[in-house]
Image: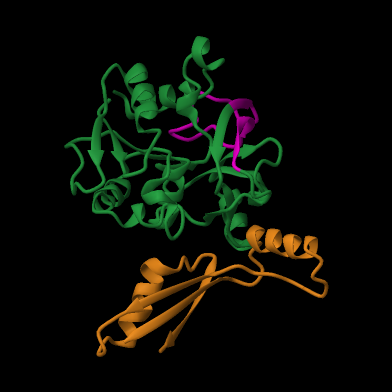
Chain colours: A green, B orange
Amino acid sequence: MKTAVIVFPGSNCDRDVAVALREVSGTAPTMVWHGDTTLPDGVDLVALPGGFSYGDYLRSGAIGARSPIMRAVIDAAERGVPVLGVCNGFQVLTEAGLLPGALMRNAGLDFVCRDVALTINNAQTAFTSRYAAGEKIIIPVAHHDGNYSADAETLDRLEGEGRVAFRYAEPVNGSARNVAGVLNAAGNVLGLMPHPERRIDGAAHGGVDGRRMFEGLLETVGA
Amino acid sequence: MKLRIFVTLKPGVLDPQGRAIHKALDGLGFAGVNDVRAGKLIELDVADDMADAQVDEMCRKLLANTVIENFRVERA
């Protein structure tokens, strides 16, 4: 599997996601600087990592979403290449218009950093094929702006189309309808606030629920 | 030309920061505050002949997220 991790100034989970991709696929990803304009030829998966791109200036993810590499990421997404945005990567994807809605300040105003339970709401996606529908998994969150917001009509549409792939089992940050992860209409772009790359090693992380997402992706792209 | 761009949350969008400010004002003993909404003011110095359409486009493409925010432009 040929993967790429986009690195923005202020990304801080780029290494973690690179380790996860290398562990699962056996090949280290290409790290692509935000100022670049092209992705590696034939890339099978693009990951946008967590962190604080551009110091969260203006709005979380707002400046990163307008950086030069994003044109190539949007083109790849439109070609059907799977794109995974974790945490700040999710914020960048909404700001870039690849996913609907917006991520606002947590309702309790606190930075939330702990393991949370997620419910798999749709197991028929490139990202969730190794999970069962309705299954509860444990994945850590670490964010200040994870409060998913969209109008009722958009939320109804997302739910109706099975695009709310992951839900918080209990309220975590005020997210509308407990949305933790959403897909684009084609199903190849996922934004997720929790960090699957921090749950890939049973001994070090206390579980492998995150690893299963990367394993499922590997299977889907057939590499 | 100086522009002042006011970016505010759309009505109905929950504003946790406004709520926290409201609570703090209550805590300081200021009675009679009905509601608080927090927004942003962005000041731009632009070419005098910049077209309104371009200002509008800058606001829509970057300065405001129109999913959750409204904006208003004031010319100084």
Q: Please provide percent x and percent y for residue B32.
A: 82, 75
Residue nearest the viewer, comparing A160 with A85: A85
> Is residue B48 depicted above or below A137 in this figure?
below
Q: Which quarter of the picture shows residue A218?
A: top left
A112 is within the stretch colored magenta:
yes
Residue nearest the viewer, comparing A142 with A20: A142
Q: Residue at x 68, y 62 (%)?
A: B21
> Is residue A139 depicted above or below A89 in this figure?
above
Residue nearest the viewer, comparing A180 with A10: A10
Quick check: A1 left or right of B62?
A: left
Residue nearest the viewer, comparing B17 with A136: B17
Q: Please provide percent x and percent y for residue A34.
A: 26, 46
Q: Residue at x 59, y 42 (%)?
A: A111
Q: Which residues are magenta?
A: A111-138
Q: Residue at x 37, y 40 (%)?
A: A11
Quick check: A108 left or right of A190?
A: right
Q: Please provide percent x and percent y for residue A128.
A: 50, 30
Q: In this rendering, does residue A6 appear at all?
A: yes
> Is residue B56 depicted above or below A10 in this figure?
below
